[in-house]
Amino acid sequence: MYKTIADPADCEVRSVIRFLNANNVKQAEIHRQVVEIYGENVMTDGMVRKWVRQFNDGRTNVHDEARSGRPSVVNDGLAAKMNEKIRENRRFTIRMLCDEFPQISKTVLHENVTNRLNSHKR
């Protein structure tokens, strides 16, 4: 019985896939070995096949590609306006801010207010 490794980094698992693939281990066997060591939920068979395909196509990097992500709608000007509204009415609610700034989601408003309050505690 092998010792299992909990919570591996994604790049660690991909490195193992790359290594086994370089040793001409079949995809199904790579998946079996990865699951045996890292546990049932580490990676699906389809994802192992995807990574093997990418490594066979010449990929060498085991890290995620950089992604641009979704751009933030909160800029410095908008943050200043939010701060001004909060200073005008200390008994504000997130709902009131949502009405004032409909272009910003409730979650983002809540995060910004929480960050602002936490930074003032220090």
Image (cartoon, grey):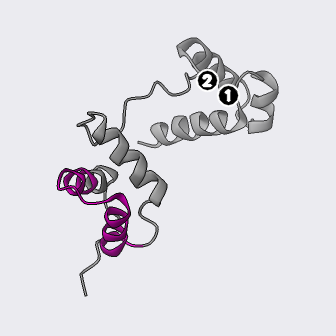
Q: Is residue 63 visible?
A: no
Q: Where, by quadrant of the figure, is residue 62 drawn?
A: top left
Callout 2 environment at 10 Å: few (<14), some (14 to 19), or many (20+)? some
Residue indicated by mark 2: 83
Which element is circle 2 on? Answer: helix
Q: Residue at x 24, y 82 (%)?
A: 2
The residue at 72%/36% (across/down) is: 106
Give the residues in magenta.
15-39
- How many numbered discs, if any? 2
Q: Say whether residue 30 is magenta.
A: yes
SS category of the residue bearing label 1: helix
**Magenta span includes 17:** yes
Q: Quadrant of the C terminus?
A: top left
Question: Vertical placement of 82 versus 48: above or below?
Answer: above
Characterize the local packing of mark 1: few (<14), some (14-19) or many (20 or more) Cα atoms within 10 angstroms.
some
Q: Vertically, is 26 above or below 85?
A: below
User: Residue 102 placed where, x, y %?
Assistant: 78, 23
Identity, as a three-letter code, of the amino acid under mark 1:
Ile
Residue 51 % position (x, y): 36, 46
Residue pointed to by mark 1: 86
**Extreme residue in the bottom direction:** 1
Q: Which amino acid does the dot numbered 2 rest on?
A: Asn
Residue at (64%, 16%) from the top-left corner? 81
Would residue 39 be visible to someone looking at this image? yes
| Residue 93 x/y as whole percent | 76, 38
Q: Are marks 2 and 1 in contact (CB under 8 Å)?
A: yes
Determine whether 65 is above or below 15 in the image.
above
Residue positioned 30% across, 70% down in the render: 33
Q: Nearer the viewer, residue 78 or 88?
A: 78
Q: Main secondary structure of the magenta part?
A: helix
